[in-house]
Image (cartoon, rainbow, N blue to C red):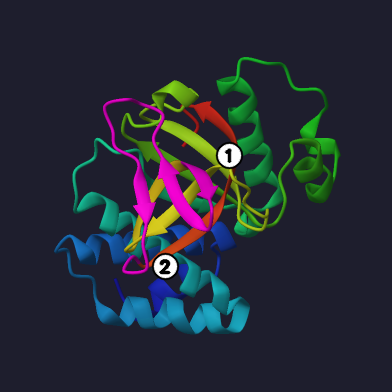
Amino acid sequence: MRRSDFKAQVEFLSNSEIYELVKKFYVQEGTGFNHNNWKIDIIYDFCQNKNPMIFSDAMADASCILSSRETGMNELKVVDIKRIDYLTKQELVDFVSQMIGAAKTNPVMDLNDIEKVDILKSFGLNQNTIICKVTGQSMENARIFDGDTLVVDTKSSPRSGNIVVASVNSELFVKRLKRVNGTVWLLSENEEFKDLEITPDYDFRIIGVVKKAVRNVI
């Protein structure tokens, strides 16, 4: 494909499509597939003019996905990420419709007739929400299963007892947070898996609080 043709295609993509494309490119490169560097340069330049955060968020999420793939998958780990921020209204409607269907409940309104901000509010979402596809068995007693999709609020203040998505040495785990006398623990909800005490030698941060788990959405 010629550069001019690729550039023209990129200019017609939505924010979420750009985000997914950058994420795909970097995940593929991390697994040994080499793209033409000029394609990345075109997307980068486009993002700088439209929204620089799209590119940086996609790269960060690709890094997390690659880290999870490099290790054993019995622990419940994040294997894909989507961001509500970059979805158009129709993409958000499609996602919420899938979420409703996966939860086997009926929609309470015609989603196409209301504003994006009202859709978010009605379903407990906000612009800081990320959608995480997970795999593993370590949280089954909390009814979070292999292949589930988690709705995660990245701005909610995590409290002891919350189920969270946490980055530990660049790997994204799903665990129950516990704080005891200044010590932070990440607890499994499956007796076959050990709890993890977070010591100073860990690179640790909490990505967000899990608000909902649904099946077969992304």
| Res. 14 visible in picture | no
Residue at position x 45%, y 80% in the image: 44
Residue at position x 70%, y 56% in the image: 127
Q: Which residues are magenta?
A: 176-202
Q: Amino acid at mark 1?
A: Gly
Query: Disc 1 marks which residue?
Result: 161
**Which type of secondary structure does the marked residue at label 2 adopt?**
helix
Residue at position x 41%, y 58% in the image: 167
Q: Where residue 170 sits: x, y (%)? A: 34, 63
Where residue 133 sits, quadrant-wise, is top left
Q: Is residue 7 magenta?
A: no
Q: Amino acid at mark 2?
A: Ala
Query: Disc 2 marks which residue?
Result: 60
Rendered position, 54 above or below 4: above
Q: Disc 2 versus disc 1: distance between alpha carbons? A: 27 Å
Residue at position x 48%, y 25% in the image: 142
Mark 2 or mark 1, whichever is nearer to me:
1
